[in-house]
Amino acid sequence: MRVLLQRVQQASVMVDSEVVGKIERGLLLLCGVGHSDTEADLVWMAGKVSKLRIFDDDNGVMNRSILDSGGEILAVSQFTLFGAYSKGNRPSWGSAAPGEISQPMFERFVQLLEAQLGKPIPTGVFGAYMQVALVNDGPATLLLDSKNPE
């Protein structure tokens, strides 16, 4: 699983000119599921996202997690995180899991996050054409990959 994580002051996602998910201070997660991802990848990613210390403490040091800060999370499915572009200039999406696999895995990932945070996680609409708006805080942006945990 790949997640592009952005610390935000606010974020929202719209479908057909309607806001379907919105948060204030917290994390925007763009989430992609790959062919070889399993429940273990989802569990690892949910744990990493919830415990990653990227919020400032009282001394201005990134030492607090989303759990510590009480912030919110907005999760949006994004198969393009698995785009391959080594051959030519048109990306290939062959490494992304198809919707019938990735949708329940994305939903399970959201469930795991909700259990860890103890509150609902707003999302986009799986498979829909979406517009995502955000005010990046920092900016602080990280790419997390369950197959390559750096």
Image: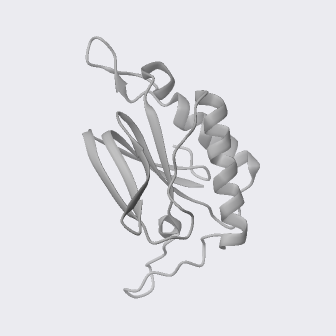
Residues 86 and 106: in front is: 106
Quick check: 65 above or below 90? above
134 left or right, relative to 1: left
**At which x and y percent is residue 8?**
32, 40
Q: Residue at x 60, y 78 (%)?
A: 94
**Residue at 48% across, 75% down:** 84
Name the residue at the front extreme: 18
Residue displayed at 65% across by 40% down: 44
In the image shown, does 35 or 30 lie closer to the viewer?
A: 30
Q: Position of residue 128 (x, y in %)?
A: 51, 70
Residue 61 placement: quadrant: top left
Q: Position of residue 140 (x, y in %)?
A: 31, 40
Outermost residue to the right: 39
Near-viewer residue (106 or 119): 119
In the image, 132: left or right of 137?
right
- The type of colouring in the image is one colour
The N terminus, quarter of image:
bottom right
Residue 106 sits above or below residue 135 on the image: below
Rendering coords of residue 79 (x, y %): 53, 67
Is 111 located above or below residue 14 in the figure? above
Q: In the rendered picture of this protein, how many numbered marks are placed on residues?
A: 0
Q: Quadrant of residue 10?
A: top left
